[in-house]
Image: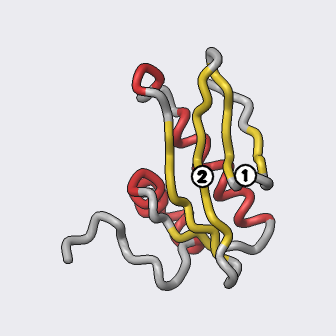
Amino acid sequence: MDIKIKHDSDHNKFFAIIAGKECSLRYEKMNNNVIDAKLMFVPKNMRGQGIASQLVEQAVNFAKKNNYRIKPTCSYVDEYIRGNAKYLPILAEDAEPVTANK
């Protein structure tokens, strides 16, 4: 599914409206050029269609273009980035896996 993703920098989110519902990746800008990817939301009936991955791709492209690193607080973002070796360089240095057992 190819969707049109928008960036709302006033509300710190990447989002798309699909069938009248918002799908989004919310983030927080940290003071050290890090974006903390905090919350992914895709309505249950829309999951499994690649929407979340496209939201992460948009966030990664934004981070690269603006010299940000990503701290993946959201477990989906964490798994997606760590599962794609080409994205590993964009991880914030202190970003530990969200799914790690402690």
Q: Position of residue 63 (x, y in %)?
A: 70, 64
Q: Position of residue 66 (x, y in %)?
A: 79, 68
Q: How is the image coloured?
A: secondary structure
**Label for residue 39?**
none
Count the marks. Answer: 2
* Residue 11 located left or right of residue 70: right
Q: Position of residue 13 (x, y in %)?
A: 67, 50
The image quadrant where one finds the C terminus is bottom left
* Label 2 crowd bin: few (<14), some (14–19), many (20+), radius 10 Å: many
Quadrant of res 78? bottom left
* Mark-to-mark CA distance, 2 and 1: 8 Å
* Residue 6 located left or right of residue 14: right
The image quadrant where one finds the N terminus is top right
Q: Residue at x 67, y 39 (%)?
A: 15
**Residue in front for this viewpoint, 7 or 91:** 7
Q: Residue at x 72, y 37 (%)?
A: 5
Would you name the residue on which mark 1 appears? 11
Would you name the residue on which mark 2 appears? 26
Q: Position of residue 27 (x, y in %)?
A: 61, 59
Q: Secondary structure at mark 2?
A: strand
Q: Secondary structure at mark 1?
A: loop
Q: Residue at x 54, y 73 (%)?
A: 91
Q: Tell me which amino acid carries mark 2.
A: Arg
Front tag of 2 and 1: 1
**Residue in front for this viewpoint, 6 or 83:** 6
* Label 1 crowd bin: few (<14), some (14–19), many (20+), radius 10 Å: few
Q: Residue furthest front?
A: 11
- Pointers 2 and 1 in contact (C-beta within 8 Å): yes
Q: Tell me which amino acid carries mark 1.
A: His
